[in-house]
Image (spheres, grey):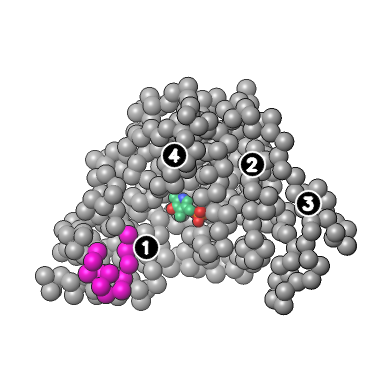
Amino acid sequence: MSVLDLARPELRALQPYSSARMEATGGKIWLNANELPWAQASELALNRYPEPQPAELLDGLAQLYGVARDQVFVGRGSDEAIDLLTRGFCAAGASNIIISPPTFGMYAVAARIQGAAVREVPLRAERGYALDVDALLAAVSRQTRLVHLCTPNNPTGNCLPPEQLERLAEALRGRAVLVVDEAYAEFSDAASATRLLPRYDHVVVLRTLSKAHGLAGARIGVALAAPEIIELLRRIMPPYPLPCASIAAALAALQPEALRLTGERLLLIRLQRELLRAALAAHPCVLEVLPSEANFLAARFVDAAGIYSRLCAAGIIVRSLQKYPGLHDALRVSVGTPEENALLLATLNHVQRAA
Ligand SMILES: *Cc1c(COP(=O)(O)O)cnc(C)c1O
């Protein structure tokens, strides 16, 4: 059996759009894409359509994540990979996906846009937001197409133990695609789920340059998977997903000097996370700080709504987790610069004294 037996059959038969850049490469005189032959006066020559999947970028990302080029899809953020996976595998009105809330919201949104049902198997709050693997497997039906995991999880910050991941990969073979979102992997010591790719053609790992690499504005996200899945995503992606400026920014971020700087910044963020965690945990207005292996901390407050608006009034914007079941009294704080984190703590002290 091929993992593509889980994909929408009509997409396997689809004749994909064939763009000018896909049909021909090389040459010197480009008269095939109805572009204007002159560029605007800017540093980048933006008069030409970009390569749909730039070879140099695919090679750089393959090297960064330790996979082969034909295991890499690059799109507009991992959000686009989530959307394409949903559209590629889920039939409207028939399929379902499984998520374990509280988790990243886009998995459910993409499914609802596609008309796929969302089955929820909540994380076990009383066990440190651990995944309930037995309950998750019991929720899998013949109509299940995608199982979404997020590690480190947004918004709780905890990682999935590798043996749970392995057990799920094993149990889901031939039944569903296991999507492992590692948007925050660089902030943790956990081994990447890419180690599962050689053995499981139904595992997809999502990575992004938005968080650790500081390129949220460029919208560069990646799906790493078996070549059959990558090929399916390319068949249904928009003709030219990546703007030239974003491709240039991503290539620059993959240069050795940029990667060295990224490494230094990761160390600083991790150090700041521990300092901030300790300071918040000791603060009288904080009930609990959840352990985090990401670049954010979720904390429960005595009066989360009050703190949120006081911080807002001081110009400090954090994320309310009010809408997440079980986290109604929690706020999520991204780890900022040392100065920003100090200012956050000083403002909390001020709020405390005023109360
Ligand atoms: C931020 C985030 C993303 C989105 O990443 P983009 O590559 O910017 O689209 C994906 N997954 C999780 C869990 C996130 O927190």
In the rendered structure, which disc, 4 or 2, sits on the residue that comes first in sequence?
Answer: 4
Q: CA distance from mark 1 to mark 3?
A: 42 Å
Q: Which residue is mark 2?
A: 236
Are dots 3 and 4 in contact, CB under 8 Å? no
Q: CA distance from mark 2 to mark 1?
A: 34 Å
Q: Which residue is mark 3?
A: 20
The residue lying toward the viewer, choosing from 337 and 19, is 19
The label on residue 112 is: 4
Q: x and y percent of residue 265 in the render?
A: 48, 68
What amino acid is at disc 2? Ile
Q: CA distance from mark 4 to mark 2?
A: 18 Å
In the rendered structure, which disc, 4 or 1, sits on the residue that comes first in sequence?
Answer: 4
In the rendered image of this protein, does residue 245 appear above or below residue 147? below
Q: Which residue is mark 1?
A: 334
Disc 3 crowd rating (10 Å Cα; few below 14, some 14-19, many 20+) is some
| 167 on left or right of 197 | left
In the rendered structure, which disc, 1 or 3, sits on the residue that comes first in sequence?
Answer: 3
Q: x and y percent of residue 27 in the render?
A: 88, 58
Disc 4 crowd rating (10 Å Cα; few below 14, some 14-19, many 20+) is some
Are dots 2 and 1 in contact, CB under 8 Å? no
Q: CA distance from mark 3 to mark 4?
A: 33 Å
In the rendered structure, which disc, 3 or 2, sits on the residue that comes first in sequence?
Answer: 3
Q: At 34% from the left edge and 34% from the top edge, which residue is drawn?
A: 121
Q: x and y percent of residue 202 in the render?
A: 56, 33
The span picked out in magenta is: 308-319
Nearer mark to the viewer, of 1 and 3: 3
Q: At 34% from the left edge and 28% from the top edge, which residue is drawn?
A: 135
